[in-house]
Image (spheres, rainbow, N blue to C red):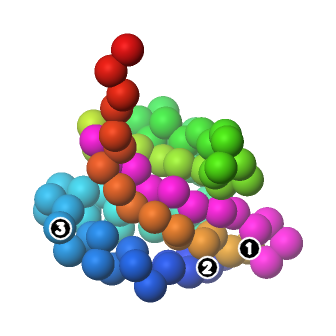
Amino acid sequence: MWQIEEHRRVEKQLDGAPREVLKRYEKWKDIAMISGPPGLRLIKGLQDEALRGGWRGSRSSRLGLQYRVMYRAIPEQSLFQVVHITPHAYRGA
């Protein structure tokens, strides 16, 4: 079973999030604890993906149309470190 560590700012970020996002985050945590990273990748709706650039080494999963959970997985310790939950900023082309 995997463990989840949340950065201290995550609680504050969730305070302003819609109720549906909170529910999806709890579901995300359930899946992550039971199945680990492979379980998150199997659920297409989460669109779990590796990040690039300054976030290299981290991953992100969709919690709704706008919100994302950004995390690091440490398989040797069976640990998820939730770093950030944020509304995803889309850039215009």
Q: What residue type is labelled 1?
A: Ser
Task: Specify start and end residues of the magenta stretch as a single range.
Answer: 66-77
In the picture, measured across the screen, residue 73 lies left or right of residue 61, that is right
Label ID, residue 78 = 1
Asked if residue 1 is positioned above or below residue 65 in the image, the reply reads below
- Please report contact status of discs 2 and 1: CB closer than 8 Å, yes or no: yes
Label ID, residue 26 = none
When asked about the image quadrant of residue 2, the answer is bottom right
Asked if residue 3 is positioned above or below residue 54 in the image, the reply reads below
For the residues labelled 2 and 1, the Cα–Cα distance comes to 6 Å
Q: What residue type is labelled 3?
A: Gly
In the picture, measured across the screen, residue 58 lies left or right of residue 29, that is right
Q: Does the magenta stretch include residue 76?
A: yes
Label ID, residue 16 = 3
* Front of the two marks 3 and 1: 3
Query: Residue placed at 79% from the left, 66% from the top?
Result: 75
Along the line of sight, the residue nearer the viewer: 21 or 9: 9
Mark 2 or 3 closer to N-term? 2
Q: Does the magenta stretch include residue 73?
A: yes
Residue, disc 2:
3
For the residues labelled 2 and 3, the Cα–Cα distance comes to 25 Å
**Label 1's element?**
loop
Mark 3 or 1 closer to N-term? 3
When asked about the image quadrant of residue 73, the answer is bottom right
Pointer 1: residues within 10 angstroms few (<14), some, or many (20+)?
A: some
Q: What residue type is labelled 2?
A: Gln
Residue 36 at x, y percent in the picture: 65, 60
